[in-house]
Image (cartoon, rainbow, N blue to C red):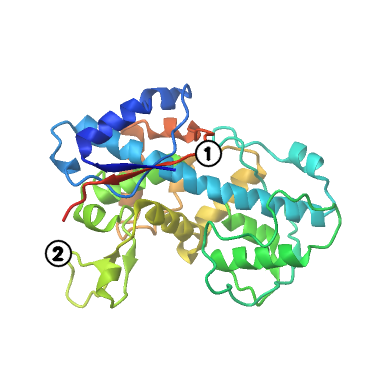
Amino acid sequence: MTVQPKLDAQNLLALFKEKNFTLDEVRTGERPVPRIVLAGLPRDLGKMDSVDDRKQIFVNTMLPLLLLVNEEIERDRARLMALRDSMKGVPADAAAKAAPSNSGGPNSNASTGAPTGGKVVTAALRAAAPGVAPHGAIDPAPADAAPTPGAAMSPLDQVWVARLAVRYGMDPARKIDLDALLRRVDVVPVSMALAQAAEESGWGTSRFAQHGNALFGQLTWSEEEKEGITPRNRHPGDTSRFRKFEDLLECVRVYMQNLNTHDAYAQFRATRATLRRQGKPLDTMLLLNTLDKYSELGPVYVKAVRSLIRTNNLRDFDQAVLHNEPQQTVVQVKRAS
């Protein structure tokens, strides 16, 4: 991992150029997305004269983050599918051939599909173990260990599944339906996430984005000052605030976790699962129809996000893939004070 010194907006543009991070080539699939991780957005982003430059910095910033979090989800999904299929007696090579492809999705080589008739396992623990991080924690069993077809799940795999279920809002004290869990452990289309972040944060220039890494309009009702930023036009009696995040990567993880767990987005998950079963790509425009509860504006919000996607041709980025280099470049920026 390399760490860059604190950069302003113009120097960020220079860094993207140095890394050959050209959006036109990413759109056409000619170039993968480098693993550049920005901790935050530059404080002078909103002061740039060129709207195109502002949008470029925002998209260049968001693409690696969205793909990284989708990559984390895909890793868990692939392992969970292998366990589910092995319990049904499906050999790994047969499952791979039978699984519908996700061509046109956010990461075209992702594992897909969840056949009906869920396999149920008994959870191995009743709560998340203390100190277990959502990502990057030590797995109780290697992710690439190939399960034996038809074999019962090992105790170590049961622990891993139970922890995954806790992370995705399922009760580990009850029997865990692996197909139900798979409907939650799945990626979010890049174009949809990009558009929502741009809409909610003014392309990264809002006060909430600048001071709290808040890109998706997520709210908190915590009484702790560090937990949120109070809107200036908040209605009397409203105690909600915009949630703050340590960095942009945490914000993206919580956003995807929200879509994958909250009851308000059950239809989003159901529609995504249907597309998987049918072997179809994750259609952003179709999935957007299920997000009318994301904002109090309802259908008006969905229409605005849809228009933003079309105007900026964001669906081009649903084909984007991360560079296979293992090393990440972490970039600190000159933040708003």
User: Taking 17 as reference, is 262 above or below it?
Assistant: below
- On the picture, is 271 further left or further right than 294? right
**Coordinates of residue 276 in the picture (x, y in percent):** 62, 44
For mark 2, what is the residue?
Answer: 232
**Coordinates of residue 194 in the picture (x, y in percent):** 37, 42
- On the picture, is 189 further left or further right than 228? right
User: Taking 219 as reference, is 202 above or below it?
Assistant: above
Q: Residue at x 83, y 45 (%)?
A: 91
> In which quadrant of the rendered view does residue 154 lie?
bottom right
Q: Which residue is drawn at 21% across and 40% down?
A: 8
Disc 2 marks a residue whose amino acid type is Arg
- On the picture, is 34 further left or further right than 140? left
Mark 2 and mark 1 residues within 8 Å of each other at the beta carbon: no
> In which quadrant of the rendered view does residue 244 lie?
bottom left
In what quadrant of the picture does the C terminus appear? bottom left
Disc 1 marks a residue whose amino acid type is Pro
User: Taking 236 as reference, is 135 above or below it?
Assistant: above
For mark 1, what is the residue?
Answer: 326
- On the picture, is 184 further left or further right than 332? right
In what quadrant of the picture does the N terminus appear? top left
Q: How far apart are marks 2 and 1 (CA)?
A: 43 Å
Element type at mark 1: loop
